[in-house]
Image (cartoon, rainbow, N blue to C red):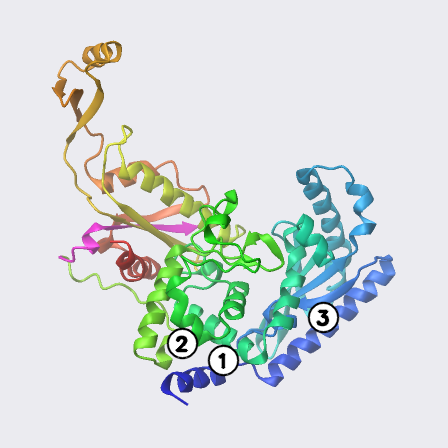
Amino acid sequence: MNNLEGILAEVLREITPTAQEINLINNIIEMLKNLLDKRAKELKINYTKIEPQGSTGIKQTQLKDDYDIDLFIGLDFTLYKYKYEGLSKNKLKKDSKKDFLELCNNWIIQSLKTKNFHNPRLLYAEHPYVTVDYLVNDIEIKIDVVLYFDLSLERIKKHGPITAVDRSPWHGRFVRDNLSEKQKDDVRLLKQFFKSNHSYGDKSAVGKVGFIGYSAELLIYYYCNIVNLFKNIQDLNKKPLDYYGRALKDLKKIPHFQNDYLIIIDPIDKNRNVASAISERAYKYCNYRINEFLKEPSIEFFKMKPILEVNLSNLNDPILSKIFIIELKNKDKQIHYTINRDKLYSLGESIKSNAEKEYTHIKRFGTVIFEVYFEDDNNEYDLVLYCDSPIISQTYTRKGPPVKDIYHANKFKNKNPKYIEKKEYLWVETTREFTNFLYFLKEFVKNRIPGNFEINNLSVSFDAINSSAKKAIYILKNMVLPFYI
């Protein structure tokens, strides 16, 4: 056993769930099944199957101390088909949502009002589902109970799913049937690596969304093992992984794939890119960390460590002097963190597009790169921005129409009497509205911050207040910018 294999074996011993953990999850699943089946019989509700999905379900790719359960209940679409006949996709989505809502409220939530399960509640993704908590030995286990239409694989491949979750049970079966036990262990190692490098899931610190569980499973499926994946991951952005054997140029002809940085096609649905949401930043940072690991293998790469707070003591740091922070407090705890995250990414994109160019499309503050970091337990959200040129000249030379375009040239001259002629075009010296990025930032966000947020601080990086803000600056400075400037 070489050093690399020895390290992976050591990590695996630490992250593999115990038999007691697996038995506990299986016992809870059986309890849930019995409760749901009993209530279904009382209400004369027909269902096709109740099956645990996700990593703790039929996939069995979970990490140690991961107890969360995804329980899926299949519905026979033929019993509902007559109601949806002839409906548009949008109308079908609305009507099926009503049916799921009714089943969630009258069947699932009522089934789980027992002493063992706590606070069954309705949540929304593309359609309603139920979340409930189970407490045992000081462990709080979150359980999602999800309804879906139990469609054949052939039907999904030919026509696509009816709801977004209709594919999920087939994902589970694909992983169960196509990955060996050794490969499932490699999935565990890969997930641990992504998590320890803060690039996993919808709470990824690097990028908007990091790698997800199903993408990790498919990476091991395509590359066979984690070592082979690590040695070839630098090519992932150039070589799509397509179960159906299509070349990159052919995939890029498909409109909804054209802007995707990574492509990992879903074996269950050839029209779905599993990697569409994975951030370019998460990929670049993990690629870098993997290369570092291969150079000097160490168990440290797999250890979960908190994000550091940036050191703000060096006031002459050339990067920190170009970083700015917006520290926000979320006042509405009912709003899901992904909604808050998406709003702030949207705000960041708006700041970037307006800061980089004047309304005339002339360069303004130069390159702007931003990141969003949040600690939703504390209701703290941070938008951190790097600005290449935070102080700029008071004026710039704006290009007008060609001299030979008499009509437009005369209009330009009348409006701008101090014009000059240069290289067969008219030009005029124009005064900027903003020459200081911080002043621009304060004015720009004044009426654009989402209503559920209040600004705690908006400043240059050196004046950051909260711990989360200092972590946000660290992330941008050390985990994002090195790959872009």
From the image, tell me which residue sits under label 1: 15
Hey, what amino acid is under mark 1? Ile
Q: Is residue 105 above or below residue 37?
A: above
Q: Is residue 373 left or right of residue 223?
A: left
Q: Is residue 158 left or right of residue 405?
A: right
Q: Which mark is residue 1?
A: none
Sequence-wise first label, 1 or 2: 1
Residue count near mark 1 (Cα–Cα under 10 Å), binned few <14, some 14–19, many ≥20: some
Quick check: marks 2 and 3 in contact, CB under 8 Å? no
Residue at 35% from the left image edge and 78% from the top image edge: 300
Element class at badge 3: loop
CA separation, marks 1 and 2? 10 Å
**Which quadrant of the view contains residue 463?**
bottom left
Element class at badge 2: helix
Sequence-wise first label, 1 or 3: 1
From the image, tell me which residue sits under label 3: 115
Q: Position of residue 139 (x, y in %)?
A: 57, 75
Q: Position of residue 370 (x, y in %)?
A: 33, 50
> What segment is highlighted magenta in the picture?
316-330
Q: Is residue 322 magenta?
A: yes
From the image, tell me which residue sits under label 2: 302
